[in-house]
Amino acid sequence: MSSLFDQFDVWGAFWMTIKLTALSAVFSLLIGTVVAIMRVSPVPVLRFLGTSYVNIFRNTPLTLIVFFSLLGLWQTLGVELSSQLPVNAFRFAVVGLSIYHAAFVCEALRSGVNTIPLGQAEAARSIGLTFGQTLREVVLPQAFRGAITPLGNTLIALAKNTTVVVTIGVAETAYLMNKVNEDASDQLTNMFLLAALFFVLLTVPIGLLTGRASKRLAVKR
């Protein structure tokens, strides 16, 4: 097992996976929140756009989205996020992962919104709050608390889905496994076990923390 660490940059690959997970989680949460607001908006056009976003990206394979992020936006349309190729691929990987998982974040938040009695929104509007104020002060805080568990599940799925970005050459865990398979196939079993252990250590705490937070922050009705 120790020879793996001597021959390959194992820690670098694991750190890349963690960075992909963390940055994509932040951006998918931001995008997903905006889309969720659009989906519950009283404006039909915004609801249509929000629904279209979810239906399109939730039903499109992540591999295609990641490929399009790099090959479509960069090679075809000339959009460049960095002059350095590895950094450029990493940033487009974050873009692809964020856009895809934002659809699931949106639906998780919408499930949280659906747990709020309609009377609360009507009461907020009756005392003069605007739609934006109602969302900010009444609806979204409760929606986030009610959606902690599905948001945690989405984050776990995101962590595991980072392996897809190996298709555009980002040097994360799956990329390292390919390198081990090519250059030291006798170490492949050890690499599989190490990668499995890494993902267990990465995702199990997320499930435990979100489960505990969900119980502590659940809105009592």
Image: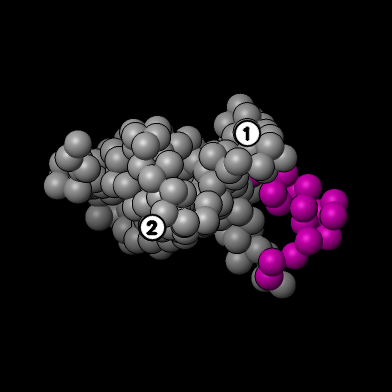
In the picture, the quarter occupied by the C terminus is top left
Q: Which residue is drawn at 72% across and 40% down?
A: 45
Secondary structure of the magenta portion, mostly? Answer: helix
Q: Is mark 1 on a helix, strand or loop?
A: helix
Is 48 left, or right, of 155 in this rendering? right
Q: Which of 195 and 142 is in front in this view?
A: 142
Q: Residue at x 30, y 54 (%)?
A: 3
Q: Name the residue under label 2.
A: 137
The answer to whether residue 177 is visible is no
Residue span colored magenta: 65-82
Q: What residue type is labelled 1?
A: Thr
Q: Which residue is drawn at 52% across and 43% down?
A: 36
- Count of marks, rendered view: 2
Magenta stretch contains residue 67: yes
Q: Nearer the viewer, residue 81 or 58?
A: 58
Is 9 left, or right, of 62 in this rendering? left
Q: Is mark 2 on a helix, strand or loop?
A: helix
Question: Residue 13 is drawn in which quadrant?
Answer: bottom left
Q: Position of residue 127 (x, y in %)?
A: 41, 54
**203 in relation to 135, above or below:** above
Give the farthest residue toward the bottom.
83
Q: Which of 129 and 14 is in front in this view?
A: 129
Magenta stretch contains residue 68: yes
Distance from Cα at disc 2 to Cα at disc 1: 24 Å
Q: Position of residue 175 (x, y in %)?
A: 50, 47
Which mark, residue 51? 1
